[in-house]
Amino acid sequence: METVNRILQEKITARIAPNKAVLIFGARRVGKTVMMRKIVDNYSGRTMMLNGEDYDTLALLENRSIANYRHLLDGIDLLAIDEAQNIPQIGSILKLIVDEIPGISVLASGSSSFDLLNKTGEPLVGRSTQFLLTPFSQREIAQTETALETRQNLEARLIYGSYPEVVMMENYGNYSGRFVVLPHAQLPSL
């Protein structure tokens, strides 16, 4: 199956602006990292992509000083941080960056939306736009299949969902025999 273009990607790209932060929330495995990389790859300026689960990233951002961030981000137009919820005090860090580094744009994502929202919400009031990325919509999937394939895959989608990893599986619509329905008497008690 070919790559599915996410509807939100264009909207997110349009919201990237100097001295503003764009936050992408969503459940795990919905494609936030893949979409962020596409945005970064297509960005015309100089970019830096960090991962909040990486110790080097944590070490680089730990010293919360304007001088540190100016040195670290010198010449960078777009700072992208994946898994941002793992960075202690990320809201205050992003506020300091967008307030003190002239012309920088920030893109941050987190799978733990409540954590990231709680950590970024108050410090970034008026400085950020938030987007929620969900599993593929039918409109997104329709880019890669015919109406007949859509009809044939409907039952599998209802059973397995439309997370990117599932939709991109080979034999996605051919789920016959992958599960066994047990009579009620054989179901385990909870």
Image: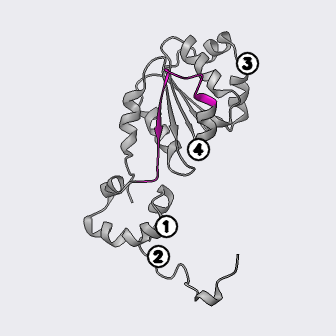
Residue type pointed to by label 1: Tyr
Q: Are marks 1 and 2 in contact (CB under 8 Å)?
A: yes
Sequence-earlier tag: 4 or 2: 4
Residue 190 in sight:
yes
Q: Which residue is mark 1?
A: 160
Sequence-earlier tag: 4 or 3: 3
Range of residues picked out in magenta: 119-136
- Rendering quarter of residue 85: top right
Taking 190 as reference, is 26 above or below it? above
Sequence-earlier tag: 1 or 2: 1
Q: Quadrant of the C terminus?
A: bottom right
Mark 1 closeness class: few <14, some 14–19, many ≥20 residues within 10 Å: some
Residue 168 in sight:
no
Q: Are marks 4 and 3 in contact (CB under 8 Å)?
A: no
Q: Position of residue 123 (x, y in %)?
A: 60, 22
Q: Which residue is mark 4?
A: 111
Q: Secondary structure at mark 2?
A: loop
